[in-house]
Image: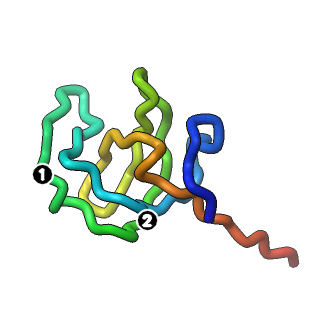
Amino acid sequence: MDTGTPSDFQAGDQVQLIRLPSYVKTAEPMPMLRPPDVLTLGETGVILGRHPGNYWAVRLGRGAFLLEAQYLAKLETQNSEA
């Protein structure tokens, strides 16, 4: 598991939440600020894309949120060869 830097992530990457921000912004057409307790430390999700200001849209269990790379770590995927 690697801690994130902006160039490390691509859409579709599996990530894990390694720190909780003081608040989170939803990745909606009309974003809303939410308290950090909507997220769980260690929760895994999928990168949806990059947004201005070095934010990443991440699909987690309770919705899509905009998070900075410092809160995310990329999960290594294991390739299964048949």
Q: Position of residue 53 (x, y in %)?
A: 40, 23
Residue displayed at 47% across by 62% down: 16
Q: Secondary structure at mark 1?
A: loop
Q: Report which residue position mark 1 lands on.
A: 35
Give SS at disc 2: strand
Q: Position of residue 62 (x, y in %)?
A: 24, 59
Q: Are marks 2 and 1 in contact (CB under 8 Å)?
A: no
Q: Is residue 6 above or below residue 58?
A: above
**66 or 63, nearer to the observer:** 66
**Above or below, comparing residue 22 to residue 17 in the picture:** above
Identify which residue is drawn at 86% across, 75% down: 81
The quarter of the picture where residue 9 lies is top right
Residue depicted at 43% across the width and 65% down the height: 44
Q: In this figure, which colouring scheme has been used for the structure? A: rainbow
Residue type for callout 2: Thr
Q: Earlier in the sequence, mark 2 or mark 1?
A: 1
Q: Nearer the viewer, mark 2 or mark 1?
A: 1
Q: Residues within 10 Å of mark 2 (few under 14, many from 20)?
A: some
Determine whether, in the image, residue 24 is placed left or right of residue 50: left
**Disc sitting over residue 2 in the figure:** none
* C-alpha gap between disc 2 and disc 1: 18 Å
Q: Which residue is mark 2?
A: 44
Badge 1 local density, few (<14 within 10 Å), some, or many (20+)?
few
> Percent from the top left, x then y, of residue 42?
39, 70
Q: Quadrant of residue 61?
A: bottom left
Number of numbered discs overlaid on the protein picture: 2
Viewport quadrant of the N terminus: bottom right
